Image (tube, rainbow, N blue to C red):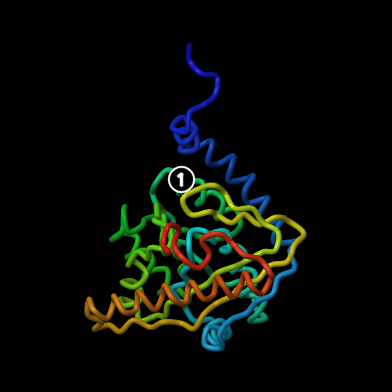
Amino acid sequence: MPSAIASPKSKRRLLHRPWAAAVLGVLASAYLRLVGATTRWQTHFHPDAQALVEHRDTAVVVFWHQRLLCIPTLQRRVGRAAGRPPPHIAAMVSQHGDGELIAQTLRRVGIDQVRGSTTRGGAAAVRAARAAMADGAIIAIVIDGPRGPHGTIHPGALFLARATGRPIVPLTFAVDRGLQVRSWDRMLVPLPFGRGCLVAAAPIYVPADASPADLDALRDELERRLKEVAIEADAGLGVERAGAALPLGRP
């Protein structure tokens, strides 16, 4: 007799259906608006990152998949920090089935998408990202997405920064009231009516003539800064998150 409980595979197939992604996108975007409106946010940007904000310069903003839900907050807080309307942000969203739910959610909170990732549609995504940056957009990239492993930096952001000459800004957020999903990335889901912190590290520039060895060194530096801002954001709110500083499973 077939089981009455849906298997993980059947649940995954359901999430990949357009109508399901649309419905869940409405619910998720409404929830993120609630969190954004009821959370008391503080922003800590490195002075060089703050200068980019104030001059409305384009950049490649990167963060761990664990802190993916910082994108809507980034849009609101960056605009407020500069005393101007929210900036144009385009998030790179994978073409995997899970990416459709993210795309539907972001679309409803006013964030554009560039579809593609380092594992699928990468070349087209880079071309679209470059075009969006030429129009003044900030490109937001989940640096270890869409499939992980957690804390493993994919090189797409480095290639994009090298091609455009624009800086990479490591970013994270933390909340004092949140849940961590039992997933590969320990996704952090903020709860309403708490305190939140958005932290940006010093930008990293990738020279146009960067060699493979240069890229490896910059990749290590980017990982270090992402770990540091995660620790800083959590510590600033007096919390400790699993997998915040080190990739899961790494000593």
* Residue 166: quadrant of the picture: bottom left
Q: Residue at x 73, y 56 (%)?
A: 192
Name the residue tied to disc 1: 98
In terms of secondary structure, where does tag 1 sit?
helix
Q: Is residue 211 left or right of residue 80?
A: left
Q: From the top left corner, tell me how far across and down residue 26 is, in percent.
A: 62, 45
Q: Callout 1: 10 Å neighbours few (<14), some, many (20+)?
A: some
Which quadrant is home to the C terminus?
Answer: bottom left
Task: In this rendered view, identify the residue nearer to me: 208 or 151.
Answer: 151
Residue 240 located left or right of residue 15: right
How many numbered circles does the render carry? 1
**Pick the front one: 185 or 241:** 241
Residue 128: horizontal and vertical position, in percent? 36, 63
Q: Is residue 164 above or below residue 7?
A: below
Residue at 46 percent of width and 29 percent of height: 10
Which residue type carries mark 1? Asp
Picture layout, residue 242 above or below residue 48 = above
The percent position of residue 199, horizontal first and vertical second, equals: 59, 75
On the image, which quarter does residue 69 sit in?
A: bottom right
In this view, which residue lies farthest toward the top?
Answer: 1
Residue positioned 51% across, 18% down in the render: 3
